[in-house]
Image (tube, helix red, strand yellow):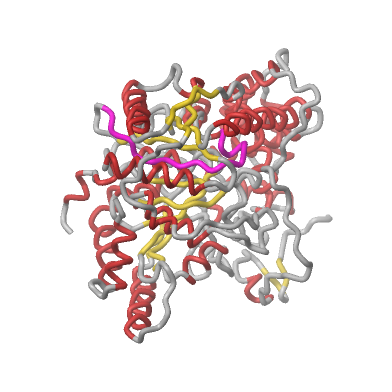
Amino acid sequence: MSGPLCEAREALVRGERTSVELTRACLARIEATDERINAWLHVDAAGALAQAAEIDARRARGEHLGPLAGVPVGLKDIFLTRDLPTTCGSRILEGYRPPYDATVVARLRAAGAVILGKQNMDAFAMGSSNENSAFGAVHNPWGLDRTPGGSSGGSAAAVAAGHCLGALGTDTGGSIRQPAALCGVVGLKPTYGRVSRFGVIAFASSLDQPGPLARTVRDVAALFEACAGPDPHDATSADVPLPVGLEAMPRDADLAGVRLGVPAEYFGEGLEPGVAAATQAALDRLRALGAELVDVHLPHARYGVAAYYLVATAEASSNLARFDGVRYGQRRPGADLAAMYGATRDAGFGLEVKRRIMLGTYALSAGYYDAYYRKASQARTLVRRDFDDALDTVDAIVTPVSPTTAFRLGERVDDPLAMYLADVFTIGCNLAGLPGLSVPCGFDEAGLPVGLQLIGRAFDEATLLRVAASYEDATGWCGRRPALCEEAP
Amino acid sequence: MSDRAPLDAAAVRHIAQLARLGLTDDEVRLLAGQLTDVLRYVEQLAELDTTDVEPTHAAPGGTAWRPSGLRLELAPGEALAAAPATTDGQFRVPKVIG
């Protein structure tokens, strides 16, 4: 299927809809259901309507408009926005208004997108359930007592609930793909370096990557194209040619000649029966579409979580040193500078952020660096080589996104390690720097969505999008909506 | 790594001091247990033979180069606007030296 974003864009071009109408409709849905979902930290209704009116006026004058002109979207609150508050889900940045836009935000604006506001998230993108937001957990539109996943849980829930036609999130260990899977939407973590990180509040700089969430693969492709590409402000952004016209992928294409790797390591114990069944059915469907399924092995995959939680926390402990109560954010008084730092950071950071700063500081501290940080960085090399070897023989790797469907809010908050294991299937992509995509592949017996993950070669997002679009066309899972969307308006 | 003692309260306070986190006593107790659990989990990395394995610190592709000279232009007032305290066009902090 095309998708609500691409359809809206066509309707705008044909003059059948105005951006003001689309924006009002999104704002009305937010108004109707966000009290129950809590997906938004800041809705800029007046600003969005003004942007929409301006796009409509420019269109009426026959001006040349960007590829997303008039399309209402949301932003995870990790992206700096010049005219909107930016908290990163944390009290320490409460009230902060950045002096500039992140590169991806500037690109969305240049493409004509209407920015509806900022979406809820786990504080500093640390979490897999959105319960680490300082501003309350997000509730999954498919079951309000369930987590939407995290850390881009507000973005995934908002897309699933029809609050916006697409959103930008970030993915450090699965934070786009896991909430996309748990909320039944599509999410793409691009190759490391594909999308600029400039103006994106840093968690783990060697792993972080912004990317889109939307209802369908083609909608995700349209957002990806608008955001990706090199940026002189980000020294890790790569100058690799970007395929164009991805969202115009042919309908109902078969997958003849496509080789897909299936790693046994991702289909073992710990997989919920509903997830296992939906994933197996998806593999059968991919084969029926003409893809060749090949056994591949990722023998170091089981060390991924351990390596990740040392590398990511080490980088986080360094990155989050900037929140010191001096240049921006909240400050708590202290008799001297050190006391002010300690009081500010204790009051401003939530427990999960403190836990990760502590772990990372320990992993980098004298006497422990070699045993923890260096060892984890070597394990990362082994994980990366596994993927490189496998992707020498196949075009993409197919796995579940998450071992479970959306779990109940509160179920894992007291067990950080159990929460970390929610990322077991998504972390490898980040450690290896590879692109990963989550596409809906069915529902479990409780009616909760299941996601299928495709992992590809570096800078080959096009293959992931093509395979996922073909699968989506053949199954129509993306057409299902949560019951809450049937309510007026 | 396997024989390491679990983190005790003193070790947690030392790390907190390095990280400039003023933890409460309750937080110290809670984190000592939770961080010990996580450290026990990550000790499985010791099973891996990493002899002659180069560490990966960033994704393949390396760092891109560009001519120097690019800068973000922020007026002093913009740069100071979000600061908790300023004085005479500068960030104001508590005294550092007695």
Residue A132 appears in the figure: yes
Residue A372 point in image, percent of width and height = 72, 28
Image quadrant where one finds the C terminus of chain B: bottom right
Segment tinted magenta in the rendering: A428-444
Residues A164 and A277: in front is A277
Q: Nearer the viewer, residue A387 or A428?
A: A387
Image quarter hosting the N terminus of chain B: top right
| Magenta run includes residue A441 | yes
Asked which quadrant contains residue B50, the reply is top right
Image x and y of residue A169, in percent? 47, 51
What x and y, as percent, mark residue B35? Answer: 61, 27
Among the 4 quarters of the image, the one containing residue A257: top left
Instruction: Inspect the magenta stretch and tell me whether residue A162 lies in it.
Output: no
A260, above or below A190, in the image: above
Residue A24: x %, y % from top left: 26, 68
Q: Name the residue: 42% across, 54% down.
A: A119
